[in-house]
Image (tube, rainbow, N blue to C red):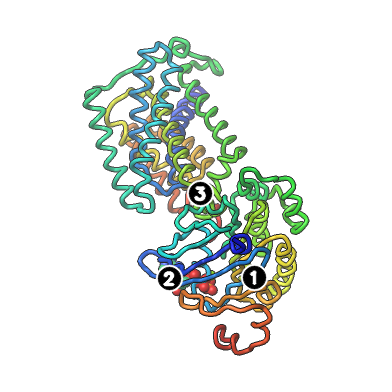
Amino acid sequence: MDNITENILELHDVETFIGQYHILFGVNITVRKGSATVLLGRNGGGKTTTLETISGLRPPFAGTILLDGKDIAGLPAYEIIQSGVGYVPEDRDIFSDLTIEENLLISSRKGNDYDKRLELVFELFPDMKKYFKKKSRILSGGQAQMLSISRALINDNKLILIDEPSKGLAPILIRELIDRINIIKKDNTVLLVEQNWEMATSVGDYFYIVQDGMTVFECTKEELLADDTIKQKYLGV
Amino acid sequence: MSILIQIIIYGLSLGMLYFLLSSGFSLIFGLMGVLNFAHGSMFMWGCYLGYILSLSTGSFLFGIIGAAVCIGVMGLVMEKWLIQPLRGNQLRQILLTFGLIYVLEELAKVIFGTRAYMQFPPEWLSGSAHIFSETVPQYRLFMIFAGVIVFLLMTLLLKKTKLGMIIRAGTDKPRMVQAIGINVARIFSITFALGCALAGLGGAIATPFLGAYPTIDMEQVFNAIAVVIIGGVGSFTGAFYASVILGFISYITSYFVPELSMASTLLAMLVVVMIRPNGLFGGKTSEN
Ligand SMILES: Nc1ncnc2c1ncn2[C@@H]1O[C@H](COP(=O)(O)OP(=O)(O)OP(=O)(O)O)[C@@H](O)[C@H]1O
Ligand SMILES: [Mg+2]
């Protein structure tokens, strides 16, 4: 029984197709409650596909996905999200024709304490307050990323999936984002895909390496930092 | 002066008709990517239903609202049983809606025959009004009024309600709408039904002035496509202004050179496509 409360998410031998292409061959991940788990791996390894599979955007072909002990494999995306998952996609995908406020409003789910969560978002990202009534198309890349994260934070989620938040951002913005995600981490369970070494290691507690559609290695932060061969073998750095 | 007022009133009323016809077509295409060729058929059925319902109940208003509701339900059924199963396959959806034109037209011919039904405006709208000493039919003013009211209500819906925000968000990024926990299939159904209801309303309002007959579907779907091309895909405001522009163009050409009525619409489309390929109000959505 302990297992059910301790692990927010478990993936067992998950396989996923994109159209006719077999992309994931066997993904096994455990995300412990309150932790930050990071998926590492070279481009095209299947990290994004893994997050899309968890969120229901790409239902798996085989395997089990337990969210808080309940098998969610095959459920439609909206049901999975509604059961307590926040999703921050790789390309931010903010609704550019909507204002910041509208982006957050439609993301807020039933039974949510919107005003309270909004305050939290404003505290973390003051820019969201500053541009609240403005169309989100005017936001810079960094601000768009913050909005994308805010959309997930506007609900009290069991799990937040974040896909390469540092992508395309200047180093100084990445550092700021690291700070923010570390604050978010305190009250949330996070599954992060990240190739930026600094972000990955300063946020993550547990690490998985995804390669050719499989999780090929897992370790703790200490193990990752202690052993340079992991970096060389799997990440080519 | 008198020609000017005439052009304004007649062009605008025609434009409002195009707007009722095409705003739903544009919304559906923008959100769902479904090019509903049977949209003109919805309009045609709106014509017949508006006629029958007003005649049988004796209330013109009941007739047009009833037609809108019936066509909305028809759209709901069509979306659920025909469009939804083909989701993600645009070519099949196009073939399907194209085929539906013939099915719905033949069905109308079986029930109503091939003749045109003329309907008189209700008594309270059959007189004339005076604008700057110019006499214009009251019904024309009613058409303008109805179009403007629908435009305002729809604008309110799209800008101020959560449903409207979701429709706008989905027109931009349909996949992401699911990823914030929204049942996009339901939004699609509602939008499709709403778009069809507007076409039905347009048809019912058009009957006292165009009549109800079986080939009106093709004529009107052509206009709907023209509006989307001129106004820009999925842009509601674009559909409104494009409809007004098209209304004026149609009326002016039919006034001076009736033979060129259809050619002028084609020409307008061509000019817009050459100058602004995304339409006058299109291309404002995000870059990616
Ligand atoms: N729509 C698609 N059709 C076919 N193959 C795809 C599609 N999307 C992704 N792939 C393939 O699936 C594999 C995994 O892609 P995925 O985006 O999950 O990798 P990733 O680890 O997130 O890569 P990156 O670090 O570049 O973001 C890649 O080989 C990619 O080419
Ligand atoms: Mg990726």
Given residues A182 and B239, the one toward you in this image is A182
- Do the dots labelled 3 and 2 sit on one chain? no
Q: How crowded is mark 2: few (under 14 residues within 10 Å), some or many (20 or more)?
A: some
Q: Label 1, on which residue?
A: A166
Indicate the secondary structure of the residue bearing disc 3. helix
Determine whether the beta carbon of the residue marked 2 sits less than 8 angstroms from the nearest atom of ligand 1.
Answer: yes
Q: Residue A98 carries which label?
A: none
Label 3 sits on residue: B171
B148 relative position to B214: left or right:
right
The amino acid type of the residue labelled 1 equals: Ser
The location of residue A116, given as percent across then percent down, is: 74, 47
Q: Is residue B248 visible?
A: no
Quadrant of image for the C terminus of chain A: bottom right
Q: What residue type is labelled 2?
A: Ile
Q: Residue furthest front?
A: A1
Give the residue at mark 2.
Answer: A23
Please tell me which residue is depicted at 24% across the width and 24% down the height of the picture.
Answer: B111
Residue B98 screen position, x and y as percent: 29, 43
How far from the left and from the top, in percent, is residue B236? 52, 41
Q: Which chain carries label 1?
A: A
Q: Looking at the image, which is closer to me, A42 or A72? A: A72
